[in-house]
Amino acid sequence: MMQRRGSLTEISFAEKVLLVVFIMLVSYLVSILLLGSLFSTGPQSMYGMMEHMMNFNQQAVILNLAAIFLAFGVGLSVSLLLRTPPSPPPPVREVDELRIIRRVLSEDEKLIIDEIRRAGKITQDSLRFRLDWSKAKVSRILTNLDKMNLIQRERIGKTYNVFLTEKRK
């Protein structure tokens, strides 16, 4: 089933080529008919007609060449009209800084970052229980991540709320 399109620039490349070839063929035939009727003088007698059919006719060659050039001109014009404008380059995708930074992080640091990212905001004690690590290990890794400005910690009573920095989310 054919879908309706908004303009001719939305058709596929193959359809554009077929359309240009068809238009060139039609323009060739029309120009042969028009130029032939304008510039050719038909044979005046039966002998002239036979001579016209049997011999090399220079006027017919010139007529065909003119029709071919006209058809190519029309085809070129149509193909320029159908040409799609160059698409703008894709927008520069903001690079996920955290993904780049993760390449230099240790496995433990990556695990903590993943847990924080999943939770959004989590307490330091919850991290310790989720990862089944010691209090000292979690504290040391979070301190390193805080120094790298990857996370932020808010003091809440005896523990901290931990979350990714705003530009890393």
Image: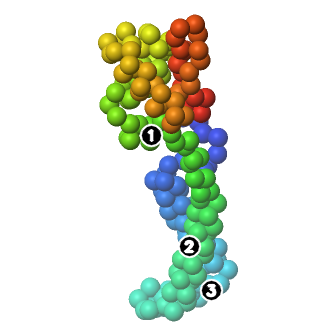
Residue at the image position 44 percent from the left and 92 percent from the top: 56
Looking at the image, residue 117 lies above or below residue 48:
above
- Mark 2 or mark 1: whose residue is earlier in sequence: 2
- Separation (CA) of disc 2 from disc 1: 58 Å
Q: Nearer the viewer, mark 2 or mark 1?
A: 1
Where on the picture, by quarter, is residue 166? top right
Residue at the image position 32 percent from the left and 31 percent from the top: 107
Indicate the amino acid at tag 2: Phe
**Residue 155: where, in percent of width, then height?**
59, 15
Residue tagged 2:
72
Residue tagged 1:
101
The label shown at residue 79 is none
**Residue 12: where, in percent of width, then height?**
50, 49
**Residue 10: where, in percent of width, then height?**
58, 46
Residue tagged 3:
41
- Separation (CA) of disc 3 from disc 1: 83 Å
> Quick one: SS at disc 3?
loop
Can the viewer see residue 2?
Answer: no
Question: Neighbour class for label 2 at 10 Å: few (<14), some, many (≥20)?
Answer: some
Indicate the amino acid at tag 1: Ile
Quadrant (top left, top right, bottom left, bottom right) of the C terminus: top right
